[in-house]
Image (cartoon, rainbow, N blue to C red):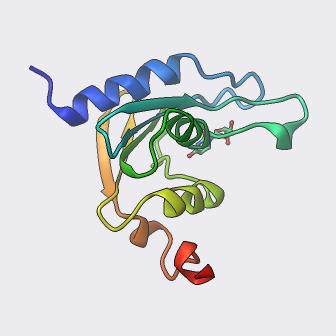
Amino acid sequence: MKNQLETLIQSATDAYQNAYAPYSHFHVGAAVVDEHGHVHTGCNVENAAYPSGSCAEEQAIGSMVAGGGRRIREIVVIGRSEELITPCGACRQRIRELGDDQTRIHICDIDRGHLRTFTIEELLPESFGPENLS
Ligand code: THU
């Protein structure tokens, strides 16, 4: 029987297979678990007008919000690279908005599986968040 992380990696892999990346050819998939235990997936969706493309994490987080989730408990990011595919700066800020210190960010590779797990504090220290506006 697969454990929870393996199941989440499989969901992110399914999204990775559907990535639309005709310009970079760099496919990325993401899968989020929300506070209800529901899984939401996303993939990168590029655009001929390059800045209009979006990241896999962005799509997965948007899907979570549209599905009624408000907190990111876990997020898997997967692609194929020698390097760790850690979220870009804007996606770190998105995870910061809807995650907390318990949120786990799992970086995975299609061939090598799970590589590293981070907290948002590790990826975006001294960050600006909702509390700063209260
Ligand atoms: N990309 C993601 O979707 N997530 C990441 O964490 C890193 C980069 C996408 C954006 C773009 O479509 C392609 O990968 C190359 O940067």
Indicate the quadrant containing the N terminus: top left, top right, bottom left or bottom right: top left
Res 36 quadrant in image: top left
Q: Is residue 89 left or right of residue 73?
A: right
Q: Residue at x 62, y 31 (%)?
A: 26
Q: Residue at x 36, y 27 (%)?
A: 111
* Extreme residue in the right direction: 49
Give the number of callouts.
0
Indicate the quadrant containing the C terminus: top left, top right, bottom left or bottom right: bottom right
Instruction: Please state which of residues 91 and 130 is positioned toward the viewer in this rendering.
Output: 130
Up-down relation of residue 16 to residue 69 (above or below): above
Name the quadrant where ligand 1 sits. Answer: top right
Q: Residue at x 42, y 65 (%)?
A: 120
> Residue 84 appears at what percent x and percent y?
45, 49
> Residue 16 appears at what percent x and percent y?
51, 24
Instruction: Please state which of residues 112 and 76 is positioned toward the viewer in this rendering.
Output: 76
> Residue 64 appears at what percent x and percent y?
49, 38
Q: Residue at x 44, y 18 (%)?
A: 14
Instruction: Please state which of residues 95 and 115 is positioned toward the viewer in this rendering.
Output: 95
Q: Is residue 13 left or right of residue 126?
A: left
Up-down relation of residue 74 to residue 93 (above or below): above
> Residue 49 appears at what percent x and percent y?
91, 34
